Image (cartoon, rainbow, N blue to C red):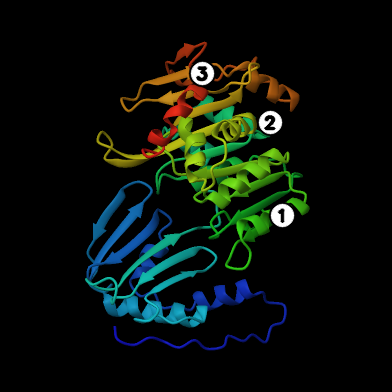
Amino acid sequence: MNQGINAYDIKSNDSKSTSTEINDNLFSNIDFGPLKTYLDDDNITDISYSNNGQVWLKSLDRGVYRVENPGINNELIEKIAFQCANIMGKTFNMASPFLDSESSELRMNFVHDSIARNGVAVVFRKTPAKIRLKKDKIIEENYITLGIHDFLIDCVKGHCNIIVSGETGSGKTELVKYLASHTAENEKIVTIEDTLELHLDKIYPHRDIVAMKTNNIASYSDVLVTCMRQNPKWILLSEVRSAEAVTAVRNSISSGHNILSTIHADRASSIPYRLYSLLESNIDVNQFMSTIYRYIQLGVHVRARYDKKTGKFLREVCEVSEFYVTDDNIPESHIIYRKNTDGTEIMNKPSKYLIDYLNAQGVDIENKNYTNENNNTEFEINEEEKVDDLEKTQYLDLDTEEL
């Protein structure tokens, strides 16, 4: 690939069309060739091309696997990159070797062969405007237990602030979308993302939802200020992966708004430490932790793994942790649910702090049984399984290196 492509002006005669609609119409005319088969398959979430002809797919049931398709080659990928560059008004060549391109439901990242020395590389990430998770299906496939499902939905109805953790590809965003679908219809939602993935405004066009996107002009902080003025009940932040995003989370929850968001962490109980590790300032750790533990009620961890018994790629909710500050002003985490790697499950009763919080919101969880007796699931019911997280802060510098 020796040539780049020059940008050209995109014009529209329809004054009612938005720039997004124009771009989507142009993207729909891209010739994806043999790739279209995989792009149209709802079961496939990601497509990776590299190494002069290798095609790797990630699907909901098989995980990551390689396919042979001679029609997908460097020539096709270069052609798609050039078309995307045209639409974006950018160039893709040795002087501009990276290209990020996105339509409403597809994200693409290209790397020029002047950088990727074994051939042009690209990753396609599908972000469909749909709720993939369905209650009956996720219960049947053991993605989540019925009891924990109902518990989380009650927590959403009770306006708990929830952060979902997990590795890349574990399905964090899909779970946030599912939880958001259970918010009350008369509660305004504002989404803040750097890349559009939630699409709640399209999924629920009848609801009061504002979809905001950060860019080089409007940062997280800028967008958040405007977001507050929109008077939302819920703020849905895209993945927390920067100091600015952490600050946005802290400002949102401390101002009385409810949030749903995602973060990379190795378990739910480590979410506060992961948030702290992303900060670039020398903020007092005790002050920061007290804010997080006081205003974020729950952390939920999802994992993806290959199941040898079924031969399928599974995603599952494996930990739910509660955060609170005790009457003695001590930050604590409390594991409500945990699914071990051997399949055994532990269920703990929520603390009085969560029960009281939800009671104040008109949701009674104290008199509900979230164990799955109807599903013959055996739980070990523990009255207390908590961790005094203030005692851990002295080891924070070591711990966060592992998160």
Secondary element under disc 3, as helix, strand or loop, is: loop
Label 1, label 2: how many angstroms apart (C-alpha)? 25 Å
Residue 73 visible in rendering: yes
Q: State the image coordinates of residue 396 (x, y, percent, origin top left).
A: 44, 33
Q: State the image coordinates of residue 168 (x, y, percent, origin top left).
A: 40, 48
Between disc 2 and disc 3, the foreground one is 2
The amino acid type, in three-letter code, at marker 2 is Gly
| Quadrant assignment, res 11 | bottom right
The amino acid type, in three-letter code, at marker 3 is Thr
Label located before the other in sequence (3 or 1): 1
Q: Is residue 195 above or below residue 188?
A: below
The amino acid type, in three-letter code, at marker 1 is Val
| Quadrant assignment, res 331 | top right
Label located before the other in sequence (2 or 3): 2
Q: Residue at x 27, y 70 (%)?
A: 116
Residue that numbered label 1 is attached to:
225
Secondary element under disc 2, as helix, strand or loop, is: loop
Between disc 3 and disc 1, the foreground one is 1
**Which disc number belongs to residue 371?**
3
Discs 2, 3 touching: Cβ within 8 Å: no
**For the residue carrying disc 3, how many other residues have a C-alpha within 10 Å: few (<14), some (14-19), or many (20+)?**
many
Secondary element under disc 1, as helix, strand or loop, is: helix
**For the residue carrying disc 1, how many other residues have a C-alpha within 10 Å: few (<14), some (14-19), or many (20+)?**
few
Residue 144 visible in rendering: no
**For the residue carrying disc 2, how many other residues have a C-alpha within 10 Å: few (<14), some (14-19), or many (20+)?**
some
Q: State the image coordinates of residue 75 (x, y, percent, origin top left).
A: 29, 80
Label located before the other in sequence (1 or 2): 2
Label 3, label 1: how many angstroms apart (C-alpha)? 42 Å
Q: Residue at x 55, y 65 (%)?
A: 104
Residue that numbered label 2 is attached to:
158
Label 2, label 3: how many angstroms apart (C-alpha)? 20 Å
